Image: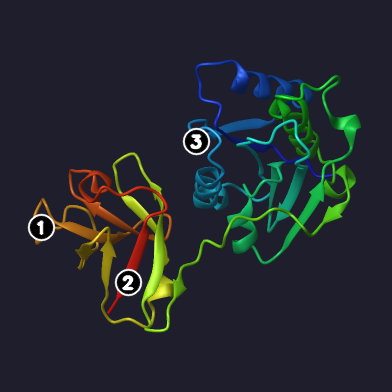
Amino acid sequence: MTSRRVITLLTDFGTADYFVAAVKGVILTINPEVSLVDITHEIPPQDIESGAFTLLTCYRDFPAGTIHVAVVDPGVGSSRRPIVVRAGTHYFVGPDNGLFSYVYDREPSVEVFHATAAEHFRQSPSPTFHGRAIFAPMAAALSKGLGAETLGPTITDQVRLPPIAPTKDDTGKLHARIIHIDHFGNCITNITHGDLLDRASFRLYVNGKAVETLRRFFTDEHGSKEEIFTIWGSAGFLEIAINGASAAEVLKAKRGDLVIVSA
């Protein structure tokens, strides 16, 4: 068995309560040599889509064999399944509620296991805190070299969010959406380079506002400070931004808003 030494944590627990510390304590009790990395604990409460996006943007930055524990779990205690996912060279542990959907879409090799091996759960698990009772000990077991296939049967009907990719209508217009608004107010769309390969130029429409300028970086000296522009973000998606201001506030935009792309 090969030891896997890095475990990441992504949750909507916040940092004011004991939840994150409890999860870390369980993992370290089982494997005190593991490296724990916090991705974030500030996912909006019960916001599965936000958690899925954040995980997508950074999981490949970690070394092969990393185990990602993700807990955004409005269905905790219900019949929703705990799962372990082996996708590419990474592992994922969390609830079967669509949280790993974008990983499924990206990775060509995905295996999903319904985690039923109760001998690896915490004794007398709390029905309201599966992060501590189920996901933490299972991640720790994986980090010590336990095979994912030993934790439960393979499933193929895992829950998925709607596909992240935009669609095209009969006129050739691309129908995209805002999938995330970051700390700076930049509106991140679900448009990738591949979606625009057939367009020498393009124009975006968001809430009735046209966005025509594409910049290479935020402080382009040829653009005005008040100009709304698009830029290719570090996550590989097209973003809508204003230098020094919040594009989301100016556009009165929110996640899920429609973005139309035309020539």
Which residue in the structure is indicated by mark 3?
43
For residue 142, side relative to residue 14 (left or right): right
> Quarter of the image holding residue 51?
top right
Which residue in the structure is indicated by mark 1?
221
Which badge, 2 or 1, is on the more N-terminal residue?
1
Q: Mark 1, residues whose alpha carbon is within 10 Å: few (<14), some, or many (≥20)?
A: few
Which residue in the structure is indicated by mark 2?
261
Of the residues tagged 2 and 1, which is closer to the observer? 2
Query: Which three-letter amino acid code belongs to the residue tagged 3?
Result: Ile
User: Vertical placement of 196 versus 122: above or below?
Assistant: below
User: Which disc is residue 80 wearing?
Assistant: none
Badge 1 marks a residue whose secondary structure is: loop
Query: Which three-letter amino acid code belongs to the residue tagged 2?
Result: Val
Residue at the spot 78% in from the left edge and 39% down from the top edge: 79
Q: Mark 3, residues whose alpha carbon is within 10 Å: few (<14), some, or many (≥20)?
A: many
3D distance between C-alphas at marks 1 and 3: 35 Å
Residue at the spot 77% in from the left edge and 58% down from the top edge: 157
Query: Which three-letter amino acid code belongs to the residue tagged 1?
Result: Glu
For residue 27, side relative to residue 256 (left or right): right
Residue 32 visible (yes or no): no
